[in-house]
Amino acid sequence: MILIGGGGFTAVWAIIWITRGSYSTAALCFGASLLLFSLLFHLTYPLSGVARPSAEYGPDGTKIRPQGYADLTFTIGLLAGVLSAAAFLMSSRFDTIDYIPSNVGGVILPAGCIAYVIYGAPALYRIFKYRDGKHLRLGPNGFEVWDSQWNSFARGDWEDIEQILDQPLKGKATFTELIVFVVSDGHSAKLGTGTITANSDALREWTRFYWRHPEHRAELIDGRSLRRLGDEKFTG
């Protein structure tokens, strides 16, 4: 409800500022609205049960990621949010917008914008580098996991993996399904699977299968690994 209300509120104010001729302020409100509605989409999309993975395979292995429209929705929201946050920080400094909060809001909003730019800029860099917002790649020699929502990335050999979990090492994820790779150097990488597939348990067990059964990893360079995932055959 907060995201719906916030997205609608900022969208209405975008229209109001346009009618007042303040186009820069309207653009900032519109960017904030895009961000909030994209976050709402990514919270509700996993609950709809319609998520299906987009997959490809080749000599480097099998890569699984969200369907294009789901990935694009979050990317647009993230880009709009980062640009709006950066623009607000610059505009408020040079007094080129018509709305600058005061009192508590005058501290919270700039701090939030700074934090979002720090989070979002590296995430956008990797989104454009890998051409997706998240993916899981399993190959004969190793793995790669990337998730822009968690700003989490890891790549390594199969021998680097110590555990594959469904929860973070610390705390608990209550709003999304996860695959958590715990690697030998002590850090972990998280992949939110709810926007990739409606069957997160199967994707996690599929990943564990190839971790535990190196004799079957040749399947990852052709279509056999995807057939195994579809059939949910995760025993040796």
Image (cartoon, rainbow, N blue to C red):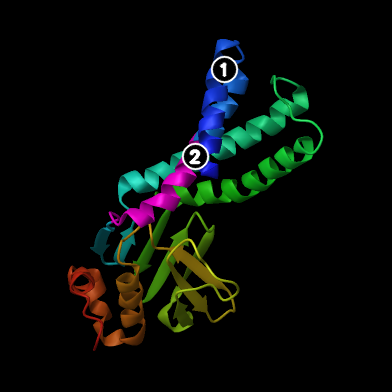
Residue 80 seen in this snapshot: no
Within-10-Å neighbours for mark 1: few <14, some 14–19, many 20+: some
Within-10-Å neighbours for mark 2: few <14, some 14–19, many 20+: few
Q: Residue at x 52, y 19 (%)?
A: 15
Residue for point 57% across, 17% down: 16
Question: Which residue appears at 30% of the width and 72% of the height?
Answer: 202
154 versus 107 height, above or below:
below
Highlighted range, magenta? 34-51
* Predominant secondary structure, magenta span: helix
Q: Residue at x 46, y 45 (%)?
A: 40
- What residue did someone put label 1 on? 16
Viewer-proximal residue, 153 or 157?
A: 153
In the image, residue 46 sits, relative to residue 136, either above or below, namely above
Q: Position of residue 111 (x, y in %)?
A: 73, 43
As helix, strand or loop, the secondary structure at mark 2 comes to helix
Q: Secondary structure at mark 1?
A: helix
Spot occupied by residue 81 in the image (x, y as percentages of width and height): 56, 38
Q: Position of residue 9 (x, y in %)?
A: 55, 30
Q: Assess whether residue 41 is covered by the magenta stretch.
A: yes
Q: How many labels were placed on the picture? A: 2
